[in-house]
């Protein structure tokens, strides 16, 4: 179900039709429209979805994992996977919906991608196609898009949240104040656990050590700041880093790029 403040641009029955054309395109809002806040409740569809961000930052919730889709990136959402979408600051983008046969060739788990020139060009062409059956040339280009998605490396823009009630309290505190640098011992006491139990259970429930989890959380919080025009130094200090160089090192390790280059690309 879509947010009532944003009328659906796609007939839901089309996204729920696993057969038919290999792919078709739809935009989140009309070109030139206003990209206001957006919230789409948890839903699923029979077709696989490639979601692209032209501007804004979209959070995609899948189970206990939050995926972040920044401008200039793509999100692959497999068929029949329940997910919710949230863009508090607004979002403008598009989707390609793939039939069951094409989706079977693509990853069975969600992923975030940074498209190369070939994939970008192919997607731009596909967005211009009229709805309906594809001709031979269009089917060949659609096959290129499928191949590119299948072989592109995924970016680490996901953060699994713990399920234990005590750990969820800690995760919520981190999310509310990512700049908080208090020790593991403090957070263990906050959760009513020993430091050893907290770190061991955190690793087991999220697949990531507590320190690395907090670093990735900070990088995810940095993305909307940088995309909105905040400087690298102000972003670093706001997220609790003592030096800009430390923030740059963590950002580059997590995303494979510098925050300055990301900010430039995100703002076009």
Image: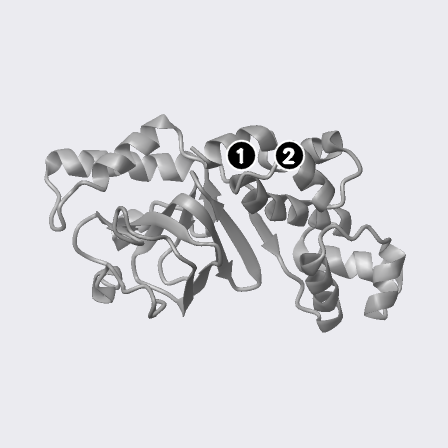
Q: Considering depth in this image, is 16 or 172 the residue closer to the camera?
A: 172
Please report contact status of discs 1 and 2: CB closer than 8 Å, yes or no.
Answer: yes
Q: Quadrant of residue 172?
A: bottom right
- Left/right placement of residue 226 relative to residue 204 reads left
Point out which mark residue 232 bears: 2
Across and down, in percent, residue 263 comes to 53, 34
Q: Secondary structure at mark 2?
A: helix
Across and down, in percent, residue 145 comes to 30, 37
Q: Which quarter of the figure is the N terminus placed in?
A: bottom left
- Left/right placement of residue 138 relative to residue 76 reads left
Q: CA distance from mark 1 to mark 2?
A: 9 Å
Would residue 104 be seen by someone viewing this image from the given angle?
no
| Label 1 or label 2, whichever comes before in sequence order | 2
Point out which mark residue 253 bears: none
Q: Considering depth in this image, is 32 or 257 the residue closer to the camera?
A: 32
Residue name at image x 49 percent, y 58 percent: 88
- Left/right placement of residue 142 relative to residue 114 reads left
Residue name at image x 39 percent, y 57 percent: 36
Q: Residues within 10 Å of mark 1 (few under 14, many from 20)?
A: many
Q: Secondary structure at mark 1?
A: helix
Compared to residue 159, the image places residue 140 above or below, namely: above
Across and down, in percent, residue 261 comes to 54, 28
Mark 1, residue position: 263
Compared to residue 216, the image places residue 196 above or below, namely: below
Q: Residues within 10 Å of mark 2 (few under 14, many from 20)?
A: many
Q: Which quarter of the figure is the C terminus placed in?
A: top left
Q: Considering depth in this image, is 145 or 61 the residue closer to the camera?
A: 61
Across and down, in percent, residue 121 comes to 29, 30
- Left/right placement of residue 32 relative to residue 116 reads left
Q: Quadrant of residue 150?
A: top left
Residue name at image x 63 percent, y 38 percent: 254
Residue name at image x 75 percent, y 63 percent: 170
């Amino acid at each position: 179900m879509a947010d009532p403040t944003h009328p659906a641009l796609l007939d839901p029955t089309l996204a729920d039709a696993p057969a038919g054309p290999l792919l078709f395109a739809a935009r989140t809002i009309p070109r030139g429209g206003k990209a206001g806040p957006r919230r789409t409740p948890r839903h699923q569809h029979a077709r696989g979805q490639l979601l692209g961000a032209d501007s804004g930052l979209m959070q995609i919730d899948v189970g206990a994992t939050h995926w972040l889709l920044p401008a200039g990136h793509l999100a692959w959402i497999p068929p029949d996977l329940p997910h919710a979408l949230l863009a508090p600051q607004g979002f403008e983008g598009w989707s390609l919906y793939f039939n069951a046969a094409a989706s079977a060739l693509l990853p069975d788990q969600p992923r975030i991608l940074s498209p190369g020139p070939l994939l970008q060009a192919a997607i731009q062409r596909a967005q211009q196609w009229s709805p309906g059956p594809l001709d031979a040339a269009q089917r060949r280009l659609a096959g290129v898009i499928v191949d590119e998605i299948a072989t592109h490396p995924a970016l680490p823009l996901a953060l699994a949240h713990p399920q234990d009630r005590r750990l969820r309290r800690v995760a919520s505190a981190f999310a509310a104040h990512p700049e908080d640098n208090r020790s593991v011992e403090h957070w263990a006491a906050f959760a009513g656990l020993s430091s050893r139990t907290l770190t061991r259970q955190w690793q087991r429930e999220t697949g990531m050590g507590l320190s690395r989890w907090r670093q990735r959380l900070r990088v995810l919080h940095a993305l909307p700041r940088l995309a909105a025009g905040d400087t690298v130094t102000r972003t670093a200090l706001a997220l609790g880093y003592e030096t800009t160089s430390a923030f740059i090192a963590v950002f580059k390790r997590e995303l494979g790029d510098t925050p300055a280059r990301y900010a430039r690309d995100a703002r076009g």
